[in-house]
Amino acid sequence: MKNEWPLWEVFIRGQHGMSHRHVGSLHAPDAEMAIKNARDVYTRRNEGVSIWVVKAADIAASSPSDKGPLYEPSQSKVYRHPTFFDIPEDVGAM
Amino acid sequence: MTRDEALFEYLLRLGDNTLILGHRVSEWCGHAPVLEEDIALANTALDLIGQTQLWLGLAGEVEGKGRDADKLAFLRDAWDFRNVLLVEVPNGDFGRTLMRQFLFDAFHSILLGKLMKSSDTRVAEIAEKASKEVSYHLERSADTVVGLGDGTEESHARMQAALDYLWPYVGEMFTADAVDAEMAEAGIAPDPADLRADYDALVGKVLAEATLDIPDSRFAHKGGKTGTMHTEHLGHLLTQMQWLQRAYPGASW
């Protein structure tokens, strides 16, 4: 597997989107080719105006086995949601 | 030869170059060494076929005999084609395909730059649209030629062999005849010979970066753009490309 190109994660900002969104991954020998490949693989249907690529190996991710300690404690803390306030009509949609 | 007859010939040359190269590149669909290159090559092929529709569509209009782009593409025989020989030679390996792409893209982008200033607005508009696609084709093929040329011992050897094989097909793109003279005089298209200096500078720079040696010889195979003598490969290509329309005339979907 040593001769395989590294894996890159691709993020694309759409025409009207404010932020880049993860769209998928691809293989490429370097960052420049990764952007070119992303252009060809992920923007063929006019999806984007900006591309980010990052080596998949450089992404630090949370571990699925930590799910309990990481996320469960927040499940029982409904008071963290701002649903207990009356919002005046004038404010409109939030 | 009237000016419109010359323009018709000239448009066939433009449209047949993109049609035949587009078909050649499309032969890689599903066969490229990696998925990303497969999609990139298919995109390039589709760009070229799209440009073909514009050039041959205009050619049919100029000819005025009721032939549209499809009729010109699918119902002419080998001797009626006006593409340069470079675009009809077989793909060979991936390296040779990309070398051919680069040698043509460099010519194509320089030519389209001049055609954007054509005295014929229809030609200028098509050139403008195509030039954006072709700038990207050139960027990509040049990068790949450098990557493989200045790569491993194996990839370098293959790219040098590709360049040695293809170089004798480069000269034809810069030969001129009565059609070119008529186009230059009308301000519709440049004299092909005038593009050579820019081409040599561009190609020389990229191939040097790719650590590849340009063959010394300026010998050039000719006969494609004039239609006097295509290689034996064109007929085989047309047999595949035109099969459906030949077997089922007028079939559409």
Image (cartoon, coloured by chain):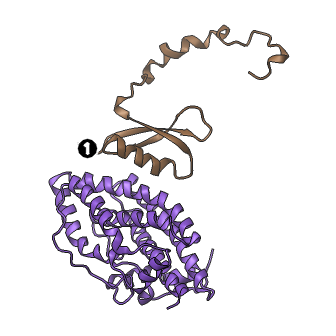
Residue B184 in percent (x, y) is at 44, 77
Q: Is residue B125 left or right of residue B197?
A: right
Residue B34 in percent (x, y) is at 35, 54
Q: Nearer the viewer, residue B38 or A17?
A: A17
Chain ID for label 1?
Answer: A
Among the chains pictured, the one given purple colouring is B
Task: Identify the residue shown where x is 39% and y is 64%.
Answer: B110
- The answer to which image quadrant residue B217 occupies is bottom left
Is residue B230 something that shows in the picture? yes
Instruction: Name the kind of residue labelled 1 in the image.
Output: Met
Task: Tell me the quadrant of the picture where the C terminus of chain B can be found.
Answer: bottom right
B152 relative to A88, above or below: below
Residue B152 in percent (x, y) is at 18, 52
- The answer to which image quadrant residue B193 occupies is bottom left
Q: Nearer the viewer, residue A16 or B181?
A: B181
Task: Identify the residue shown where x is 61% and y is 89%.
Answer: B65
The residue carrying mark 1 is A1
B142 relative to A23, above or below: below
Is residue A27 something that shows in the picture? no
B91 relative to A31, above or below: below
Q: Badge 1, how many Cα within 10 Å: few under 14, some, many 20+?
A: few
The tint chain A carries is brown
> Residue lying farthest front?
B185
Label 1 SS: loop
